[in-house]
Amino acid sequence: MKDFWLSCGHHMLDRDERGRLRVTDEFVKLYLARPELTPPPDACAVECSLHAALLSDPWRPIAATELDAIAEADARENWRHLVSLRDHLAAHQTLEATYAALVREKIPVPPLFLDQLVHLILRNALDRCDDAYTLRAAELFFRPQRLTVYDGSLLAADQEHIDANGVAVSPLAVMFGAQEEPDIEVLTDANAQHYWDRSDRFDLAIDLTPGRRGLAALGTVIGQWVQHLLGIELTVEPLDELHNIALAWYVGLDADGTKIGDALWNGMEIDDATRNRVVGLFRLKFHDDSFVIDRMAGEAVYLILAMAPDRVVRMKPQNLLVGLPVRQVDSVT
């Protein structure tokens, strides 16, 4: 199989007998190489000594007093977050279990760290995937997307890529709001075979127009994500419209999707402006109701993905882990 997303560092991890990701010394050292944690030339002696010690032994116990002694406030905060994440990794058997504990217990973690864990877990869950549309759709789970309507299509492009420096050379780049950005290329059947060679560039846009392949691919990823973390098989079907839907249960796939779901649940009218911010609507059905709470047996769950007023989608995949009407399961312990 072709490799992809090498930048997430999945080669630094081992797998257990169930295929979950085990943390290694080398993986923890990757965090120590991040610019937020590499001591600058003017760093204090405490920070430099701590960094050197962890490079030698990534699991070395660290007292709170050591962190308090770091002179620079931002550096102290970065180190506290890293040590907290490292200690959670040590307390659980796998990255999947660590992620589940963090989101279920609502432990404060910088969004960057959560996104990195999602990136790695999805890389593992989609290891044998040979469909470029599915892999590109999966990027929504850990990278914010900027959306625009172009030539009648709803397109999503990587926000960081859009905001990068460059020279605007195409009308499509301008439509995405890029003042200084290279040309934007949309994933199609003609260029799909090149996805693996450029997967770490995150430079391909995806068509999320209802009824087209992009939303179907996102539904596939949602199913793979839930199955990998919870061990529950299900079907996720994209829907074209937000009309005449009886919400027995819903999950917002982002903050704005949750707000729209809350409004519908409470019987509020959704105006056209709000309706037009809905990017994806999905119907989720469980294959085995024994995993489902009693009142939802045989019922569908609706998933709502929406863009914020700034036309950016910031997906929250943790909502799928904590928001579905399932009985307590131990698949991610």
Image (cartoon, rainbow, N blue to C red):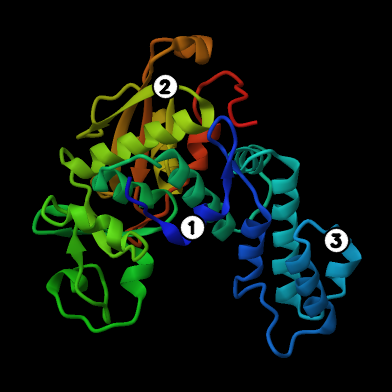
Sequence-wise, which precedes: disc 3 or disc 1? 1
Which x, y percent locates residue 229? 52, 32
Which x, y percent locates residue 100? 61, 38
**Disc ID at residue 233:** 2
Check disc 3 and give the amino acid type.
Ile
Task: Residue lying at the far front in this picture: please name it.
Answer: 1
Sequence-wise, which precedes: disc 2 or disc 1? 1
Q: Which residue is mark 3?
A: 62
Which x, y percent locates residue 236? 32, 28
Q: Is residue 170 visible?
A: yes
**Disc ID at residue 8:** 1
Quadrant into which the N terminus falls: top left
Which x, y percent locates residue 203? 28, 65
Assess disc 1: are there few (<14), some (14-19) or many (≥20) residues with their C-alpha within 10 Å of its C-alpha: some
Please determine whether, in this image, residue 162 is positioned above or below residue 92.
below
Q: Is residue 266 visible?
A: no
Left or right: residue 327 compared with residue 149:
right
**Label 1 residue SS:** helix
Check disc 1 and give the amino acid type.
Cys
Please determine whether, in this image, residue 52 is positioned above or below residue 6.
below
Assess disc 3: are there few (<14), some (14-19) or many (≥20) residues with their C-alpha within 10 Å of its C-alpha: few
Quadrant into which the C terminus falls: top right
Check disc 2 and give the amino acid type.
Glu
